[in-house]
Image (cartoon, rainbow, N blue to C red):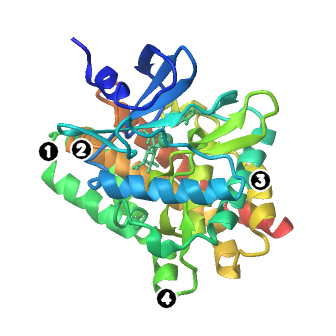
Amino acid sequence: MKDIFQLAAEQFALEGEILSNEPYGDGHIGVTHLVRTTKKNYILQKINHFVFPEPEKLIQNIENVTDFLDARGVETLRLVPLKTGGNLLRQGENYFRVYDFIENTVYYQTITDEKVFRNAGRAFGEFQNTLAEFDASVLHETIAKFHDTPKRFRDFEAALAANASGRADTCKPEIDFVLSRKDTLDKVTKGLADGSIPLRVTHNDTKLNNILMDAKTGEARAIIDLDTVMPGSMLYDFGDSIRFGASTAAEDEKDLDKVHFSVSLFKAYAEGFYGAVKHTITPAERELLPYSGYLMMMECGMRFLADYIAGDVYFATAYPEHNLVRCRTQFRLAEETWAHFDELKDIIDSL
Ligand code: ADP
Ligand code: GN1
Ligand code: MG
């Protein structure tokens, strides 16, 4: 019997005959397959409609954003239509889409070369500049209050109170870490609310494996995973890249002795990003660049821990403690970043 991925792939207007259809990549949200045909390679994704409850609106956003980028000569995702037209396949409960595979690129889970991270910073900064002309009124908010960190804290408290998995007593130190830092989480949401930080159209999920780099030159090629392009703050985009990339280890490294916040990687990314946005960034945003990495480490760590306590209902996990391991790396990074704020401010001032 054919599986749902094969049945789905056959509905799209692919060139050539399908040769293989296998799991691919390191995303935590959708299920991604690489489909090889006699002519081309494609990315087939099962959309997670628990996370994105309105797949039709999600696809409309992708159509609008990719058309906008394409018209400006920016290499971007290219949706492949269904044989019957349209870009979204619904099969029973499941939703699928297909993209052209972006060839001759690589993605990173950790950074070994500062140059690559500087290039990623420049690309995300330029992406931000390009999106400045995008009409936010045509965008659906695909996930409400996505980076509202104080709300994420309340969600964490609710997950803890419910303790659906019964695991809360196995992660007491991590829970205490979050609770003790409650008052450090509201600088960006406050700034957005009082207008001191501008609302911009942002990517919102700028981790390193969401940017494809040229396999030969190490230059940035395409920013992918556009599902969370929504109104937000530039600080979320800068901070989330720092969260994931300015670390000496992978997001799910079990050995915390290997996990450190790297000031030199922060500097490399900041040089690239700041170089691109220096004409549009406001003083209030500039001031919070060092803090934004800390904020995203706390937010993401809190989300991993909440999901561990809720019983792994949101992020894809490979083993039972995966979300707990992930939250520990985030909290280690948050602690170290906090201790380096003065140094990070000096770096930003020097740019
Ligand atoms: P998720 O939302 O689950 O993170 P992504 O859209 O980021 O899903 O895709 C998961 C991974 O698949 C990416 O990190 C990247 O490695 C790979 N990928 C996605 N789209 C493409 C594409 N068009 N070309 C090449 N690789 C891709
Ligand atoms: C998810 O989809 P992916 O794997 O690129 C998550 C991000 C988290 C990240 C942590 C829609 O990103 O918010 O920061 O995992 N995306 C969504 O690795 O929740
Ligand atoms: Mg992704």
- The structure residue drawn at horizontal position 57% and vertical position 38%, both measured from the top left corner, is 209
Image quarter of the N terminus: top left
Q: Quadrant of the C terminus?
A: bottom right
User: Mark 1 or mark 2: which comes first in sequence?
Assistant: 1
Which amino acid type is marked by label 2?
Ile
Q: Respond yes or no on whether mark 3 lies under 8 Å from ligand 2.
A: no
Q: Distance from label 3 to label 2 (Cα)?
A: 35 Å
Asked whether the beta carbons under mark 1 and mark 2 sit within 8 Å of each other, the answer is yes
How far is mark 1 from mark 3, CA to CA? 41 Å
Relative to 66, does residue 27 appear above or below in the rendering? above
Tell me the residue that label 4 is attached to: 194
Q: Are marks 3 and 2 in contact (CB under 8 Å)?
A: no
Tell which circle, 4 or 2, labels the residue nearer the N-terminal end.
Answer: 4
Query: Which residue is tagged 1?
Result: 164
Q: Which mark is residue 21?
A: none
Decide which of 264, 146 is in the foreground and name it. 146
Tag 4, which secondary structure?
helix
Q: Amino acid at mark 4?
A: Asp
Q: What residue does disc 2 label?
A: 309
> For mark 4, does the 10 Å Cα neighbourhood hold few (<14), some (14 to 19), or many (20 or more) residues?
few
Q: CA distance from mark 1 to mark 4?
A: 37 Å
The location of residue 244, given as percent across then percent down, is 57, 44
State the separation of the CA atoms marked 4 and 2: 34 Å
Residue receiving disc 3: 267
Residue visible at 50% across and 80% down in the picture = 192
Indicate the amino acid at tag 1: Ala
Residue 307 in the image: x percent, y percent? Answer: 29, 45
Measured Cα–Cα span from mark 3 to mark 4: 29 Å
Q: Nearer the viewer, residue 169 or 271?
A: 271
Secondary structure found at label 1:
loop
Whether 80 is drawn above or below 301: the answer is: above
